[in-house]
Image: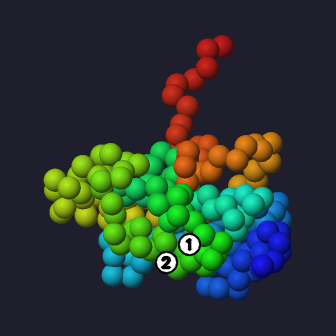
Amino acid sequence: MASPSKRREMDMMKLMMSDYKVDTINDDVHMFYVTFHGPTDSLYEGGVWKIKVELPDAYPYKSPSVGFVNKIYHPNVDESSGAVCLDVINQTWSPMFDLINVFESFLPQLLLYPNPSDPFNGEAASLLMRDRPAYDLKVKEYCKRYAKPEDIGAPEEISSDDDDDDSMSERGSDSVDDNDEIAGKADP
């Protein structure tokens, strides 16, 4: 098997040569954004999300961290941080998987088959279990409101002063919501 750095570069190249738009951050192969489209024939069809991906030094032996940058309404995605609760990424990751698997299988499956019994978004899980039509409507509303191509914008520059091994998939990201505004004005 290739060394982790060679494998990281190879998987990154495969992803860039696929149909996915990949935006690197400061030409770093450890952290980048991928444009992800909602699966066809799903509630998320037509939605476009910017997914932040972080590859640990031990990738592919350690799983990548993935998180939605723009909002998505889903029981297994934290609404405020975009962190993803997905067993195959967080717990059962194998070096046999690669980044293409994440975007062609794992994330589409997550959106197609939400698991309300293991939620990151308790409100979405509860709504899905008690009122499916209302859940479906809210998902579509979020797609229209937050998942348009213009909502993913250009990638931001990120400093690399955070060297811990925690992953977004487990703890969430430190992103700031673009819709947050400062309330009131500062005292003179």
Q: Residues within 10 Å of mark 1 (few under 14, many from 20)?
A: some
Q: How is the image coloured?
A: rainbow
Q: Residues within 10 Å of mark 2 (few under 14, many from 20)?
A: few
Residue furthest out toward the top: 188
> Residue visible at 33% across and 76% down?
42
Q: Which residue is mark 2?
A: 105
Look at label 2 and name its amino acid: Ser
- Between 34 and 60, the residue placed more toward the observer is 60
Left or right side of 83 for 95: right
Q: Quadrant of the C terminus?
A: top right
Residue 154 in sight: no
Left or right side of 66 for 30: right
Number of dots carrying numbers: 2
Residue furthest out toward the front: 1
Q: Quadrant of the N terminus?
A: bottom right
Answer above or below: position of 184 versus 28. above
- In x, y percent, where is residue 172? 55, 47
- Determine the image quadrant of residue 45: bottom left
- Determine the image quadrant of residue 143: bottom left
Residue 47 in sight: yes
| Helix, strand or loop under label 1 | helix
Left or right side of 81 for 44: left
Left or right side of 171 for 138: left
Which dot marks residue 102? 1
- In x, y percent, where is residue 55? 71, 61
- Verify CB contact (< 8 Å) between mark 2 and mark 1: yes
